[in-house]
């Protein structure tokens, strides 16, 4: 498993505004979107491409195009939805699937309540969107789901990771998956409620206006 913690002043600045509890939902949504686009630039570094013959106003040349099959982008509902536009801005031709997963706040167990994905993901490059890699339970379940359908190349894009969640993913997931985690920061730890510390609170609530 590769972990890319993006070291860039704009990423650090936007993330700090997101962390601030005084940041209102509308600003939070806008900055999360911009931050994901910055992360998407790194997350797509190994996106599959093929040569293509093109004619410039001057001459013929061999250019580059995204190859088939199309990449698959999968926001994990609910909070991953707030990352979808930021990623598809750079990959507008990608197919979008959906996975609805919910964490029980008491047991921290994850269950799938919705799935809109092709049955066969063989050969597809998959980009999973979930802002907070906390215990890792959600992303582990989501990656296992994709792996069972044939996905072997999975990139998880997150705003924040906890070291506990990264360790859990490394231990739980089949090593045959070509797995990359791209994140704006790896924080210190999880608290007893499973929140990332220092973190940014509940990403879904802050994205969708449940808290001010
Ligand atoms: N999910 C969140 O939204 N925030 C956390 O800190 C952990 C999980």
Image: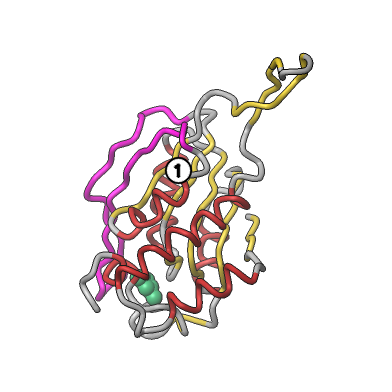
The image shows residue 144 at horizontal and vertical percentages of 43, 47
Q: Is residue 156 magenta?
A: no
Residue 36 vertical position relative to residue 195 in the rendered view, above or below? above
Q: Residue at x 27, y 41 (%)?
A: 115
Which of 138 and 207 lies nearest the eye of the viewer?
207
Residue 204 vertical position relative to residue 146 in the rendered view, above or below? below
Q: Residue at x 25, y 68 (%)?
A: 104
First to last magenta residue range: 92-121
Q: Residue furthest front?
A: 57
Q: Residue at x 25, y 65 (%)?
A: 208
Q: Residue at x 56, y 67 (%)?
A: 184
The image shows residue 111 at horizontal and vertical percentages of 27, 56
- Ligand 1 visible in quadrant: bottom left
- Considering the image in quadrants, where does the C terminus appear? bottom left
- Considering the image in quadrants, where does the N terminus appear? bottom right
The image shows residue 179 at horizontal and vertical percentages of 58, 49
The image shows residue 85 at horizontal and vertical percentages of 40, 49
Residue 164 vertical position relative to residue 159 in the rendered view, above or below? below
Which of 36 and 5 lies nearest the eye of the viewer?
36
- Pointer 1 residue: 88
Number of numbered discs overlaid on the protein picture? 1
Q: Secondary structure at mark 1?
A: helix
């Amino acid at each position: 498993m590769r972990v890319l913690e993006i070291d860039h002043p704009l990423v650090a600045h936007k993330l700090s505004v997101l962390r601030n509890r005084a940041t209102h939902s509308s600003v939070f949504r806008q900055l999360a979107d911009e931050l994901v686009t910055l992360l998407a630039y790194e997350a797509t570094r190994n996106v599959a491409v093929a040569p293509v013959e093109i004619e410039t106003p001057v001459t013929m040349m061999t250019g580059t195009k995204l190859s088939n099959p199309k990449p698959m982008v999968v926001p994990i509902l609910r909070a991953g939805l707030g990352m979808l536009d930021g990623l598809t801005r750079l990959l507008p031709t990608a197919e979008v699937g959906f996975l609805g997963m919910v964490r029980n706040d008491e047991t921290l167990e994850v269950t799938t309540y919705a799935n809109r994905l092709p049955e066969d993901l063989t050969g597809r490059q998959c980009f999973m969107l979930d802002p907070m890699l906390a215990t890792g339970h959600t992303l582990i379940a989501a990656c296992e789901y994709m792996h069972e359908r044939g996905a072997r190349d999975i990139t998880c894009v997150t705003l924040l990771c906890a070291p506990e969640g990264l360790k859990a993913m490394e231990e739980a997931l089949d090593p045959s998956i070509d797995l990359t985690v791209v994140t704006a920061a790896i924080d210190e730890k999880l608290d007893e409620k499973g929140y990332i510390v220092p973190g940014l609170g509940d990403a879904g609530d802050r994205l969708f206006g449940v808290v001010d």
